[in-house]
Amino acid sequence: MTNQKLETLQGLSLAKKIYSNREQRAREIKAEGKKIIGYPCTYVPLEMLTALDLVPYRIYGSIREPITEADRALPTTFCPFIRSCLDLALKGKDNFLDGLVTAHSCDPQHRTAHIWESSVKYSYTHFIDMPGTIRADSMAYYKGQLEDFKKTLQAFTGKKLTASKLKAAIKLHNRQRQLVQELYELTKPAQPLISGTEILQTIKAVMSLPVAEGNELLQQVIGDVNKRSAGPKKKPVRLLIWSSTLDDVDITQVFEDKANVVMDESCGGIRPFRGTIELTADPLDGIADYYMKEITCARTFRQARLGETTKDFARDLQSRFGYLKGIIEDWKINGAIMFLVRYCDPFAFEMPALKAYFDGIGLPSIYIEYDYNIGSLAQLKTRVEAFLETIS
């Protein structure tokens, strides 16, 4: 079956269409009377927005849009992804948004959030201060941050955020997480049924839609893929991409020229969808546990054992990266690319330890840093091909 014929399938073609023009569907939803809240980070608890009938919209940058307006507010030696997000906002590219929610996932987002709020006028803004460690006191602090978020959302919407509404929203988002997990199961066969590029298109499209509509799209895509007699061409290398963000199909196609991308461990891939939120008596407790403990982002410090004052490097590596071993075994991964935008300090500081972990389990890997622009892809292609030649 040719790629052209595959694209005629309803779910895959719809995902590609939404991916190609995410703003169009958002504007249609806004015209229907919905309020759309933008967020640039997976640490924003979307369940709280959905529970009050607000539509979460994941904000991305663009590797194709030269950064000009953001240069007035941010230095050039600064995270290019968040610079691009601010640049697009200053240019009015996402002027359909009613609000903006940011989180202290890293210092660049923290600093940019306040510039963003003062430079672009939204009906609603909120900043969530995320602790950097997982301890009893940090969990209590984060729960307080969620309580503050709840208050400002209620004031903005004029609605009460009840436990029953929040539990219903959690169930919807948990269903979405389960569907994304099913989507990645389709890359497990020796010849994957779906490509990494198609998965990226689908997830980015889903992050543009109300959760129920996103769930319908995921079900359609999974149904389409399961009808295939064969998926993408089988290639010698099955890749894991470990990254802060991976948000453009031109990048995944560089990887997939000579490899199958079977796992994208980034905030635009499996990372925010790997687990589910427990339905606790106070739903905010389950939300706090999930966003602090289950999202495996470099910005959160995880020690081998809480309260220890001595260091055990091997146990710390296991605590931070041990979840990857099961993925590597189950998906039969034989190469990893540690892929990072320039100036992403939290992830850059993780690279030596992650490299040591991959070496310890015998997985070939390479660290590649790139500028967040379309011109960097030629150099990226050269480095990727050189790495793949060493393991194929």
Image (cartoon, helix red, strand yellow):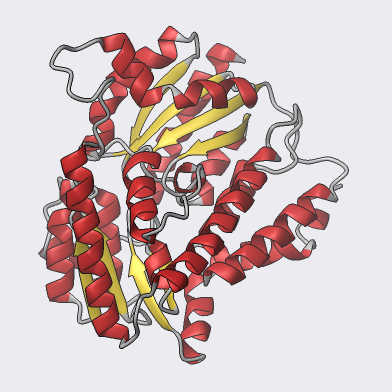
| Towards the viewer: 71 or 9 | 9
Q: Is residue 314 left or right of residue 51?
A: left
| Towards the viewer: 220 or 47 | 47
Residue 64: which quarter of the image?
Answer: bottom left
Q: Is residue 228 left or right of residue 113?
A: right
List the single residue furthest toward the front: 281
Residue at (85% x, 51% y) in the render? 227
Residue 367: which quarter of the image?
Answer: top left
Residue at (25% x, 24% y) in the render? 303
| Towards the viewer: 111 or 125 | 125
Residue 166: which quarter of the image?
Answer: bottom left
Rendered position, 233 above or below 205:
above
User: Whole-percent x and y of residue 204?
Assistant: 51, 58
Rendered position, 214 above or below 236:
below
Q: Is residue 32 left or right of residue 237?
A: left
User: Whole-percent x and y of residue 201?
Assistant: 58, 55
Residue at (54% x, 67% y) in the render? 211
Q: Can the viewer see residue 211?
A: yes
Residue at (45% x, 48% y) in the render? 272
Q: Can the viewer see residue 132?
A: no
Which quarter of the rendered picture does the C terminus lie within?
Answer: top right
Rendered position, 192 above or below 225:
above
User: Whole-percent x and y of residue 63?
Assistant: 38, 54
User: Whole-percent x and y of residue 65?
Assistant: 35, 62
| Towards the viewer: 146 or 117 | 146
